[in-house]
Image (tube, rainbow, N blue to C red):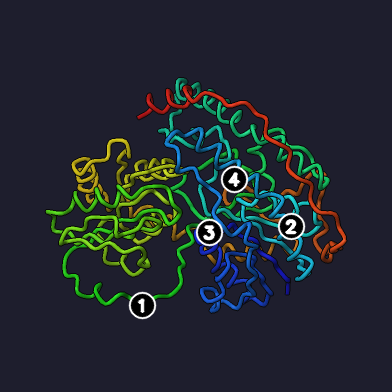
Amino acid sequence: MTKILAFTSPAQGHLYPVAPVLAELVSRGHEVTVLTLPDSEQALAQFGLTVRALPPALARDTLHDWATTARIPALRAALRALIERIPEEIQALRGAIIAERPEALLIDLTAPGAQILAAASGLPWASWASTLLPIPSRDVPPFGPGLRPRADLLGRIRDNTLQWFLTRRWNEVLPQLNHMRQYYGLDQLDNAVDYLRQPPLLLNFTAPPFDYPRGDWPLSVHQIGPGLWAPEAEPPAWLADIDRPIALVTCSTEFQDDGRLAQTAMDALADSEFCTIVTTGAVDPETLTVPPNARAESFVPHQLILDRADVVVTHGGLGITQKALAAGVPVCVVPFGRGQSEVARRVVTNEAGTWVSAKRLTPATLRAGIDKAMTLRAGAARVAAGFAAAGGTLRGAELLERHFAGHPIGHGIWSGTTPTHSSHPYPTNEVAPQITRGEPDPIILPPNDSPPSEDRYWTTWQRRDR
């Protein structure tokens, strides 16, 4: 039996995918504590997990990338939000280690501060990612704008040029990241994006063919398929009364100012055979004009609707997109930011749905995208088959169990052993680190003095590719 401490970012979309894996570890006799969103105890009660709440400074949303439509400022906002949380993450994880005395750590990939302490702790540790991974690869375009994969010379020139540009943007936070790594005795990174390569084992909640295969990724990356779990819920009474085909429309649960997707979708389908069900997420449904054949709710569990849905219209969140495709339902994606263009590109590449630009969003363009998506059910079925073959919860738990026990783990495609940090290999049977309350607090992050950079290269490459 291993005592495991898990640390999540403050979002249900990061907690829910990994929750069944943690539950499977509990069923195998391990003891699991999860440091996560406050008020998660009820949702996780069925799993036998011990739940500790993140401190208020980490539980609140600090990502305001929705305030700009320009991609590079949004990328900067996201990176700086991650880096600014590092000291608080370290303090929170350190306190949990003192209280719980774990024998292994499982860290959300989007918690770089918790990763730093995990790597310095001497304990076996691993990570998971509920998002698509932006680890650079020669086999795919640079992550962000959702470019079409190209293997020709022009494609390689495009990809190399854009990757150089993006690496420079990532490296604007490199001094702060390395400052904290050095403070905890870890090697400096050459590039900020390399922090994604540090986990000795990384579970990624997606799988081919939806995500692209790569031949040059770290051997530590294992794609196990999407996390489909959500807390049990009773169907609303009105759902049983619907006797028409259903179009499910979703907005982001993390505010990104995408309410016009909800309104445009209802307008586009107002004269259709569909009953349009809109989950508005972070948008107030009272701000919408709802036609007779539609219903707008701030929240309805999507699993209650997907088995009856004919099409899903979505902002491109990876969670709802993969849930729809896992159910064999085609999607029409209207990305508004974050990694949503990459989600849309994978949907189109797999012929499992369509991509409608938010800049060209009108009832007519969206209706055309929905109509075309309805013809692509076969592509959605192929993606669903790939997800089912990826192993899911059982494979994730098995990989973690073997890793924490010190057994080598081969990649899903290649053979090999799980790497450890070159300067800090951990003994697999080491007891919990002697972290005490007398240890000095983490030092403050240095100011970010990186000069702003122009957005023109990014914009040019994206325009040429669309």
Residue where numbered disc 2 is placed: 91
Q: CA distance from mark 3 to mark 1?
A: 22 Å
Q: CA distance from mark 4 to mark 1?
A: 36 Å
Marks 4 and 2 close (CB-CB < 8 Å): no
Q: Nearer the viewer, residue 58 or 405?
A: 58
Residue where numbered disc 3 is placed: 11
Relative to residue 242, is residue 426 drawn left or right? Answer: right
Residue at image position (24%, 74%) is 238
Which residue occupies the extreme front position in the image? 287
Marks 1 and 2 close (CB-CB < 8 Å): no
Q: CA distance from mark 2 to mark 3?
A: 19 Å
Q: Which amino acid does the dot numbered 3 rest on?
A: Ala
Q: Earlier in the sequence, mark 4 or mark 2?
A: 4
Q: Earlier in the sequence, mark 4 or mark 1?
A: 4
Relative to residue 172, is residue 457 drawn left or right? Answer: left
Residue at image position (40%, 53%) is 252
| Residue mark closest to the camera, 2 vs 3 | 2
Q: Which amino acid does the dot numbered 2 rest on?
A: Gln
Q: Is residue 183 above or below residue 203?
A: above
Q: Earlier in the sequence, mark 1 or mark 2?
A: 2
